[in-house]
Structures are given as C-alpha cells and as structure tokens.
Amino acid sequence: MCEIFISADPVLYESRARSLRLHGVSTSIRLENLFWSVLEEIGERDGMTLNQLLTRLYDELTECRGEVGNFASFLRVSCARYLALQVAGRIPDDRTVSLRSLDPAWVLAEERAQGRAVTPMARVVQSGLRSDAVSAQTATSPRGA
C-alpha cells in the first residue's frame, strides 16, 4: 500500500508560497505544488489566471460564509472536491468544458441527495465530526436527562 503513495514525485508535495492581492491587500498563500497544479487547471477551464481564480473563490466564499478562517485549507479541500467530482463523473475530464457552463445543482445532486460530501475521506471526516458533536453534547448534558 505505501508504495502507491511513497512513489509520488517529491516535487508534488514540496510547498510553495505565492503572493497575490485580494482587494488591494497583499497576501501570501503556501500550498503544495500538486494543489497549485490543480488550481491552475480549474482556472484554465474557465479562462482565468490563477490570481483571478483565487480572487473569485475568495469573493464567493466571503459572500456565502462571511469571514474566511483558513483560505489555504479551503483551497486544498476545493482541489480534493474537484478531483473527486471528476472521478464520480460529475465534472467532465474534458478540460475544454468550462466549469462555469456546468449546472451546480446537477454536479452536486448526488452528494446532496445522500446528505454527504462526495469523497470517502469527507465521509470519514463528517462522521467523525458528528461523533465528536454527539460526544460533546453527551459530556455537557446533565446525567440522567
């Protein structure tokens, strides 16, 4: 099993910082090269530069969720979701098909119908979060209630 993972090109897991401006504010984001490659592919599908994609994701995230806690983590999860949705057949492998042209409701229909994220890892994480929430609730609930 380990050979599958340890045989990866070390360049893929080297991290690299990139500087960009988000609404006039200079910032730096550090990600592994693999994630930068996936983000570049996502941007290219819609004719955007990497900086344009990151700005758009940041803007849409803040509009939807408010303050952004950890943008680098959000980007890693976005890459994993993109790849998982490709494997699931919800995003075409054909890179000439822009993501903007896809119907988000259809792309996300399977996971929404099942009330879960599309990746096995996300299911594990969500399951663990639910278990933690139940444990925390049990720990703070009065005994015998």
Image (tube, grey):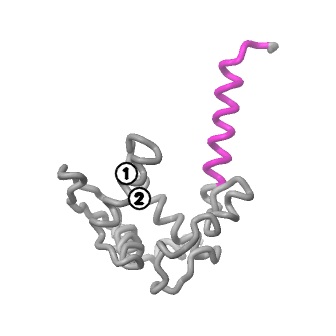
Position above or below: 102 against 24? below
- Magenta highlight: main SS: helix
Q: Amino acid at mark 2?
A: Leu
Q: Amino acid at mark 1?
A: Phe
- Residue picked out by circle 2: 75
Give the side of residue 45 with respect to residue 107, left or right: left
* Circle 1: element type: helix
Residue at 63% across / 48% down in the picture?
126
Magenta-highlighted residues = 123-143
Residue at 57% across / 75% down in the picture?
91
User: Looking at the figure, which quarter contains the C terminus?
Assistant: top right
Q: Position of residue 63 (x, y in %)?
A: 41, 47
Do the residues bearing badges 1 and 2 touch, measured as CB atoms within 8 Å? yes
Q: Position of residue 135 (x, y in %)?
A: 68, 30
Residue at 50% across / 72% down in the picture?
5
> Is residue 105 visible from the viewing direction of this image?
yes
Question: Which circle marks residue 48 in the picture?
Answer: none
User: Looking at the figure, which quarter contains the N terminus?
Assistant: bottom right
Position above or below: 136 against 32? above
Q: Residue 100 magenta-drawn?
A: no
- Residue picked out by circle 1: 71
Few, some or many residues within 10 Å of mark 2 (<14, 14–19, 20+): many
Residue 64 vs residue 71, the one in the foreground: 64
Q: Position of residue 101 (x, y in %)?
A: 50, 76
